[in-house]
Image: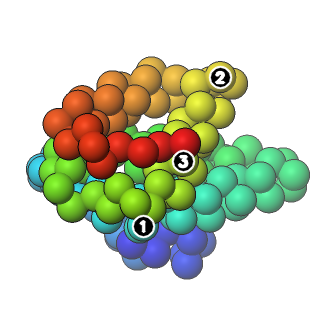
Amino acid sequence: MKLLDFDMNSESYGLDSRSYLISVAKKSVKNESLNFYVQNFLPLIDLLQKSRKEAQKEKQHIKLKKYETLICQIWEILPNYCHNYKDYNFEDTAYLQILLKQMDKIIEKNLYSARIITLKNLCALIDYFKGAPKDNLKIK
């Protein structure tokens, strides 16, 4: 997906950027790697949040709403990546801490009106770690 490489006002934005793949992933991705989500989607969320801030400063309300929609859509697919705990590197908790901090901000401030989505994601992460070997969990 190349969500930021094309003009959001273009009629062919969805096709050009392949943003439609987010909804396809939500319906078709099952039992995938949390590492994949963390390494590929978290940086994308960060880029979208930065672009959203720029749109907000420039008072581009339509772009602002489009960025928020994309961010929410990406957050909505997180539970699809919370099944196979065997692939997660429990020694490297940096990404997990970043993920939890971002989720905490969304829940606390109800950013993008995504509190419910984020609470569902938090439940999925809790279920994910219930299946993990307890001796591997060393989160600070």
Name the residue: 30% across, 48% down: 136
Label 3 packing within 10 angstroms: few (<14), some (14-19), many (20+): few
Q: Label 3 belongs to which residue?
A: 97
Q: Label 1 belongs to which residue?
A: 39
Question: Which of pointers 3 and 1 lies earlier in the amino acid sequence?
Answer: 1
Label 1 packing within 10 angstroms: few (<14), some (14-19), many (20+): few
Nearer to me, 99 or 65 = 99
Label 2 packing within 10 angstroms: few (<14), some (14-19), many (20+): few
> What amino acid is found at the position of numbered circle 2 in the picture?
Glu
Name the residue: 35% across, 56% down: 90
Q: Nearer the viewer, mark 3 or mark 1?
A: 3
Q: CA distance from mark 3 to mark 1?
A: 13 Å
In the image, taking residue 86 as reference, residue 49 lies left or right, namely right
Residue extending farthest to the front is 135
> What amino acid is found at the position of numbered circle 3 in the picture?
Gln
SS class, disc 2:
helix
Q: CA distance from mark 3 to mark 2?
A: 16 Å
> What amino acid is found at the position of numbered circle 1 in the picture?
Gln
Question: Which of pointers 3 and 2 lies earlier in the amino acid sequence?
Answer: 3
Marks 3 and 1 in Cβ contact (< 8 Å): no
- Badge number at residue 108: 2
In the image, taking residue 37 as reference, residue 2 lies left or right, namely right
Marks 3 and 2 in Cβ contact (< 8 Å): no
